[in-house]
């Protein structure tokens, strides 16, 4: 390549990450769920920073923040998400958004264009997993928005959009043919890089995530006078299923399969009442579509077996995000940039976390770059990454974007 890649400004990058950390601060992390006041303040702040970077910002009807560059020519879409999980980390999502912003403005300072920037709403799925990126690629209908509820407090999504001032706003669509691809930087959220003394992860593929609500209907009754043999205890039935899943999944899972019960609710939830109803949110993940299908079939069998017991069992499939391979040319560009900036400090690896890149990979080539998470901690307020790793990641990300645009 005839010229050096535009240099990012590490101090400006870190300053913006710390400013973003200030929207919803919680201990050393951030509590900034989608469409909360803090989240919308962060979105408006980002829009102002995109404008200063020379991009035309817009916040659309689902809360996506999109910064569009002027002119034609080859172009990449860079981004990640702004909202956080509950009482979680300051870098999950934020790192990729600020990297994208810094690439755009460092290129503009060198008289170069070629990147648009996006912060995709609700990647964390407080209402709809990957709602913003799915909307941007045209995969989210009004009926799904109308039916979506907050997974913690049940608030209808339309109500949250209205409270956020987004109602009746048009939802932006990805312009056909505008982008050569989508690139996202993210924290690893696991401990593999740190354990191996590495500083960069080049993502090979992203797991598919299949999510379910499982509900048991039993009979509410007195906890003291209802004989054990006469009970239809929905809570006990659910607990038995959780253990049966764990036992059977270990027989059919793949080497990297994971499964999680993230929420359990008993109704009415008093210690002296046999629960009449019980529900849980359950998900499993794998990079292999055949393994996902096998786990789904096993789950359906187990729920059908449970339904033969004293309570009625219901399995509702909520979401099925497909696993996605990352583009080999983008991986090669990340590898070349990584070798140039930090020889021997990277590895190629799958992502155990879901990302908006797996949604964009449905419609264009996509690539991801990881930086290490200290102790592998994420979705927790103690999540953190060493500053020099944050800066190195930004340099490598910017260099890879530049080489792909120059190709
Ligand atoms: O859960 C995930 O994998 C992502 O961090 N939302
Ligand atoms: Mn994330
Ligand atoms: Mn996350």
Image: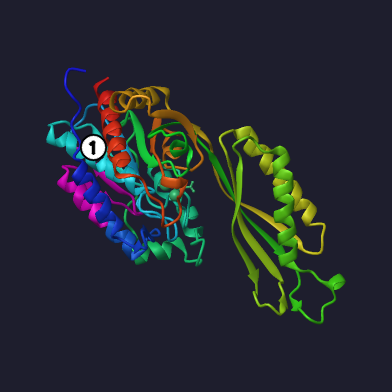
Q: Residue at x 42, y 62 (%)?
A: 158
- Where residue 36 sits in the image (x, y, percent)? 36, 63
Judged left or right of residue 407, residue 329 is right
- Residue 59 among magenta residues: yes
Relative side of 224 to 72, left or right? right
Q: Residue at x 79, y 69 (%)?
A: 232
* The magenta segment: 44-69
Give SS at disc 1.
helix
- In this rendering, is residue 110 above or below 144? above
The number of numbered badges drawn on the structure is 1
> Residue furthest toward the top?
2
Identify residue for label 1.
103
Q: Where residue 103 sits: x, y (%)?
A: 23, 37
Specify the quadrant that holds the C terminus. top left
**How is the rendered protein coloured?**
rainbow
Give coordinates of residue 240: x percent, y percent. Answer: 75, 58
- List x then y, in percent, for residue 340: 29, 23
Which residue lies at the image location 71% right of the left edge and 63% below the top edge? 216
Against 240, is 326 above or below? above
Residue 196 part of the magenta segment: no
Q: Quadrant of residue 203?
A: top left
């Amino acid at each position: 390549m005839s010229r050096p890649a535009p240099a990012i400004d590490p101090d400006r990058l870190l300053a913006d990450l710390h400013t973003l950390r200030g929207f919803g601060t919680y201990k050393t992390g951030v509590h900034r769920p989608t469409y909360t006041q803090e989240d919308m303040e962060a979105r408006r702040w980002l829009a102002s920073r995109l404008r200063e970077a020379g991009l035309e910002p817009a916040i659309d009807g689902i809360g996506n923040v999109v910064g569009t560059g002027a002119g034609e020519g080859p172009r990449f879409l860079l981004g990640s998400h702004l909202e956080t999980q509950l009482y979680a980390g300051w870098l999950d999502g934020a790192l990729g958004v600020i990297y994208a912003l810094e690439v755009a403005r460092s290129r503009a300072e060198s008289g170069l264009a070629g990147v648009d920037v996006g912060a995709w709403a609700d990647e964390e799925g407080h209402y709809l997993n990957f709602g913003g990126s799915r909307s941007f690629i045209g995969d989210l209908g009004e009926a799904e928005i109308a039916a979506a509820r907050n997974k913690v407090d049940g608030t209808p999504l339309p109500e949250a959009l209205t409270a956020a001032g987004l109602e009746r706003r048009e939802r932006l669509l990805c312009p056909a043919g505008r982008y050569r691809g989508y690139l996202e930087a993210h924290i690893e959220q696991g401990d593999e890089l740190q354990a191996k003394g590495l500083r960069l992860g080049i993502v090979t593929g992203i797991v598919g995530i299949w999510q379910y609500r499982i509900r048991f209907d039993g009979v509410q009754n007195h906890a003291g006078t209802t004989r054990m043999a006469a009970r239809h205890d929905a809570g006990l039935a659910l607990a038995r299923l959780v253990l049966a899943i764990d036992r059977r999944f270990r027989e059919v899972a793949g080497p990297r399969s994971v499964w999680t019960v993230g929420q359990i609710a008993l109704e009415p939830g008093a210690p002296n009442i046999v629960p009449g109803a019980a529900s849980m949110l359950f998900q499993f993940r794998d990079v292999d579509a055949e393994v996902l299908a096998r786990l789904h079939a096993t789950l359906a069998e187990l729920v059908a077996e449970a339904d033969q017991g004293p309570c009625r069992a219901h399995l509702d499939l909520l979401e099925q995000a497909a696993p996605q391979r990352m583009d080999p040319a983008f991986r090669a560009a990340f590898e070349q940039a990584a070798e140039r900036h930090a020889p021997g400090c990277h590895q190629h690896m799958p992502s155990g976390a879901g990302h908006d890149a797996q949604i964009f990979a449905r419609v264009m080539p996509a690539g991801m770059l990881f930086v290490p998470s200290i102790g592998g901690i994420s979705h927790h307020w103690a999540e953190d990454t060493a500053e020099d790793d944050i800066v190195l990641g930004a340099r490598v990300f910017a260099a890879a974007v530049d080489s792909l645009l120059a190709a």
